[in-house]
Image (cartoon, rainbow, N blue to C red):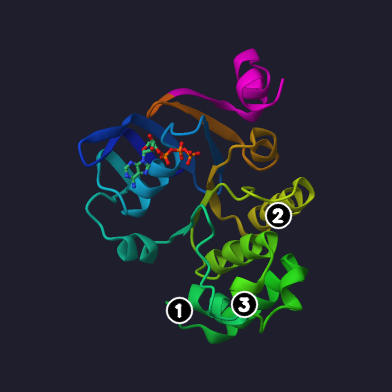
Amino acid sequence: MTLLELADVTASYGPVRVLEGVSLSVPDGGAVGILGANGAGKTTTLRAICGTVRADGRITFDGRDLRGLRPDQVAALGIAHVPEGRGTLGRLSVLDNLRVGAYLRKDRKAVSADVEYCLDLFPQLRARLSSSAAALSGGEQQMLAVARAFLARPRLLLLDEASLGLAPGTAKTVYEAIGRLRRESGIAMLVVEQNANLAFTLVDTAVVLETGRTVLTGTAAELKGMDEIRRAYLGG
Ligand code: ATP
C-alpha cells in the first residue's frame, strides 16, 4: 500500500520556483531515498510534505491530502521530521528532548519502554541522559534527533542529511542504527542523503532530483548499476 504520494509537486520561495515537478511514492513500511546535487530541491521536498513550505500538486498521506495543513497537523497525522542540522533543543537535557518527542502521547508506560529502546539503539545516549543536548557531539546530537522523532511513534520518518558533518565511522553507526529501527519498527522512511553509498544501505528505492524535478526513479540496485549515478553520487 502507498503511504505517501507526491505527484507533480511545485513550490517556491517568494518568486523563485524551486520545485518544478517532484513525484515519488513511499510504500507503507518502505524506505525511499532522495538523491540530487546541492540545491536540487531535496530539503524543500521534505518541507513541502511537513507543511513548512507551501506547495502545489498532489501530496497525500494514507490517502489524505496534506496540502494546506499546518506543520503540527501534519505531525499529528504521524509524520516526524528530522531536519538538516538536527533541530534538537540545546538547553534541554537528552532525556527532556526525548520526552518532548513523545509529548502528544498519553501511554506513559509505552513511552518509557520506547525511551529504553532508544537507549539500547543508541547506547552513547544512555551515559548522557542528563547532559544538555548542546553539549553532545555531532554524532550524538544526530542520534538524539532520530530518537526524539521515533518517540512520536510516527508512521513516516523524514530524514534530512543524517550524515552531514559526521566522521565516516560515526555516520555508518548512525545509519546502521536507523536501519535496525526500520527493521524492528516498520516505520516508513523518506531519506535525503548526499552520501548515496550510505543511503543505499538503508533504502529500497530512490528518486533523483535535478533542478526541482524527479528525473529518475529506481531500486537501489538499479541506480547503483547506472554509470551516471556512480559518477555523480557514488564517487566513481
Ligand atoms: P542542499 O543539499 O544544498 O540542502 P537541496 O537539494 O536540499 O540542497 P534545497 O535546500 O531544497 O536543495 O534548495 C533548493 C533551492 O532553493 C536552492 O536554490 C536554494 O538556494 C533555494 N532555497 C532554499 N531555502 C530557501 C529559502 N528559505 N529562501 C530562498 N531560497 C531558498
SS state under label 1? loop
Q: Amino acid at mark 2?
A: Val
Q: Residues within 10 Å of mark 1 (few under 14, many from 20)?
A: few
Q: Is residue 217 visible?
A: yes
Task: Please say if 203 is above or below 21.
Answer: below
**Given this view, does label 1 or label 3 mark the residue nearer the observer?**
3
Q: Is residue 109 magenta?
A: no
Tell me which segment is drawn in magenta.
215-236
Lower sequence index among marks 3 and 2: 3
Q: Amino acid at mark 1?
A: Tyr
In whole angstroms, how far apart are the C-alphas of marks 1 and 2? Answer: 24 Å
Name the disc covering residue 94, or none.
Answer: 3
Residue depicted at x 34% and y 59%: 74
Between residue 23 and residue 199, name the one nearer to us.
Answer: 199
Lower sequence index among marks 1 and 2: 1
Name the disc covering residue 42, or none.
Answer: none
Residue depicted at x 66% and y 60%: 138
Name the residue beneath numbered marker 1. Answer: 103
